[in-house]
Image: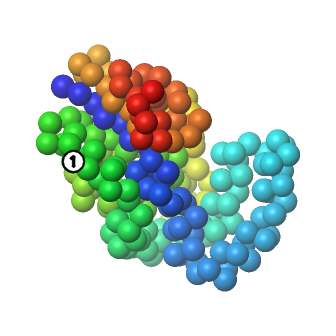
Amino acid sequence: MALALFDFDGTITFKDSFAGFIKYAVGRARFYLGVACLTPVFAGFLLGFIRAWRAKELMSIFFFGGQDTHKFEELASKYSREKLPEIVREVARERMEWHKQRGDTVVVVSASIDLWLKDWCKAQHVDLIATMLEVKDGRFSGKFLTKNCSGREKVRRIEERFDLSDFDYIYAYGDNPGDRPMLAIANERYYRWTRI
């Protein structure tokens, strides 16, 4: 029995779903206005004062904080079903199908928010491990409920969900340095669709 681990943004897709969902949820005008307001955050990240996960969380708080959970989940579900299929790479779709036909356990392991990935994953009949948002009094705070699912956190979350000794072989697919710890636990690794 084999386990196939796929990063989402940049690996399964050719566009970033985080920015894509924000534009979808708030509109382009508010998205670019928000980006302008968040310029100090981006500057802090580029200068090394703010870590990547914190910059992402601050974006999440700015755009998602105070959103009604029911309405927001409906919007995320619609984006998942209608927009995500448009940005999926054909090579990723084919490879996932190959794994499923073999009977492998296929898992999307993503730093993106689970809300707009889960319906797509459900439609593909694959498991999902992703970053989750905090809910307070029926509204999203924008803060992360879980650690940002990147780097070593990907491995921790995978090992929390699965006993890796149950699998005879592990495949992993990624596209950026945050995927390297996940690639390191695999027998067969692909970085930007090239076997390494």
Left or right of 142, for residue 105: left
The part of the image, by quadrant, that contains residue 22 is bottom right
How many residues crowd around disc 1 within 10 Å: few (fewer than 14), some, or many (20 or more)?
some
Where residue 23 appears, x then y in whole percent? 57, 74
Q: Amino acid at mark 1?
A: Glu
Which quarter of the rendering shows the C terminus? Answer: top left
Q: Residue at x 85, y 46 (%)?
A: 47
Q: Is residue 85 above or below residue 184?
A: below
Q: Nearer the viewer, residue 87 or 33?
A: 87
Where residue 191 appears, x then y in whole percent? 47, 36
Q: Residue at x 24, y 36 (%)?
A: 105
> Is residue 131 among what the camera can see?
no
Check disc 1 and report the residue beneath it.
Answer: 97
Which quarter of the rendering shows the N terminus? Answer: top left
Q: Residue at x 52, y 27 (%)?
A: 181
Furthest residue toward front:
194
The part of the image, by quadrant, that contains residue 150 is top right
Left or right of 116, for residue 61: right
Q: Residue at x 32, y 61 (%)?
A: 119
Badge 1 marks a residue whose secondary structure is: helix
Q: Nearer the viewer, residue 181 or 158?
A: 181
Q: Is residue 97 above or below residue 168?
A: below
